[in-house]
Image (spheres, rainbow, N blue to C red):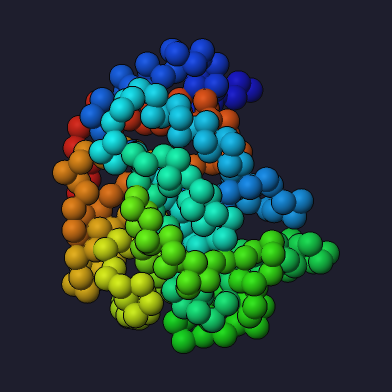
Amino acid sequence: MRQWLRPDEVAHALGGALPGPVLTRSVGAALGGLSVSLCLHRVGPRRPTDWQPGLSMEASSLDTLVDLLLAHRPGRADGWLSLSFDDGYRDAAEYVRSRAPRFPGVEFFFFVCPRKLETRAGFRWDAVEKRLAAGASRHEALRPLGEPHTVEAEAHRAELQGLADEPPFALVSVDEVRALAGLPNVRVGNHSNLHASPQTLSDDEAARDYRESREDFERLFGRQRDFAFPFGTPRHHFSQRHVDVLRRQGDSTIWTTEARPYRPDERRPGGVVPRFPVDGSRSPAELAGWIAARALKFRLAGSPHRF
């Protein structure tokens, strides 16, 4: 049977095959005056026990991707390109700290789960990796991912205690986040306390998570200007009612993982803004080709669904 490639796979393959100058021109033609935000998580080599390799990207590869995207608008320093790092890992913070001065025209976002930073309770998927490394079966290791999330209990789960201080899973400290926020082209944002897909929560639990994480964030870091939905795919992980809850609680810009560029007027207080979820296992050229293809599709399709 013939196996057809999905459109995104074709875009990745095409980007990887194009000569550098042709790829740069293609990216420029596809993007035009649109803005791009990339969503990443960790920076560094793949760990032997990492069961989600696409969430990590080598620093040198990320540098190459940034250079490639910037090449079609040399000299532009208007923040049209942003790099956004979710979850608050220390390796990502080190990348932001070292690269923000190197790329002054790029805007860097660093989204954290404030209660996890304070309690040093890590993430469930890191507990999965730790279990797999200890020899647990995949079925047993994955079990915590399917258990209910509650604001009251999440930071006190036994397998998460202290995980944020273990080297393979290290999260930044509160003071390290404050230092990042002091850099001129870095913005710190809220990523909720639970880090659960909103669609898996009751409406009351989701509202409580957004309210309490905002209170924690503002106590630690000042006004919440940006909020990134965990997981973040529109209509799959969140819906209009979750956007409405956030808007009732304040005027934060709301960030998703919808894979497309955006018009500058979409980014505003209360606006819902897309980010490209970067697969770190892809090459910079493959990712650039995918971004160009998605941008062209967006321009041809017209206005996106608005929340």
Decide if residue 95 is in sight here: yes
Q: Position of residue 122 (x, y in %)?
A: 59, 72
Which residue is depicted at the point 25% across and 58% down? Answer: 253
Q: Position of residue 271 (x, y in %)?
A: 21, 54
Where 121 sits versus 59, above or below?
A: below
Tag count in the figure?
Answer: 0
Which residue is depicted at the point 49% across and 16% down? Answer: 20
Instruction: Using residue 74 as the reference point, say whether residue 52 is left or right of it.
Output: right
Which residue is depicted at the point 63% across and 47% down? Answer: 44
Q: Position of residue 172 (x, y in %)?
A: 54, 66
Instruction: Using residue 210 as the reference point, say whether residue 17 is left or right of it.
Output: right
Is the N terminus in the top left, top right, bottom left or bottom right quadrant? top right
Is the C terminus in the top left, top right, bottom left or bottom right quadrant? bottom left
Where 140 sits versus 255, above or below?
A: below
Q: Residue furthest right?
A: 135
Decide if residue 194 is in sight here: no
Indicate the quadrant where residue 70 lies: top left
- 303 or 36: which is nearer to us? 36
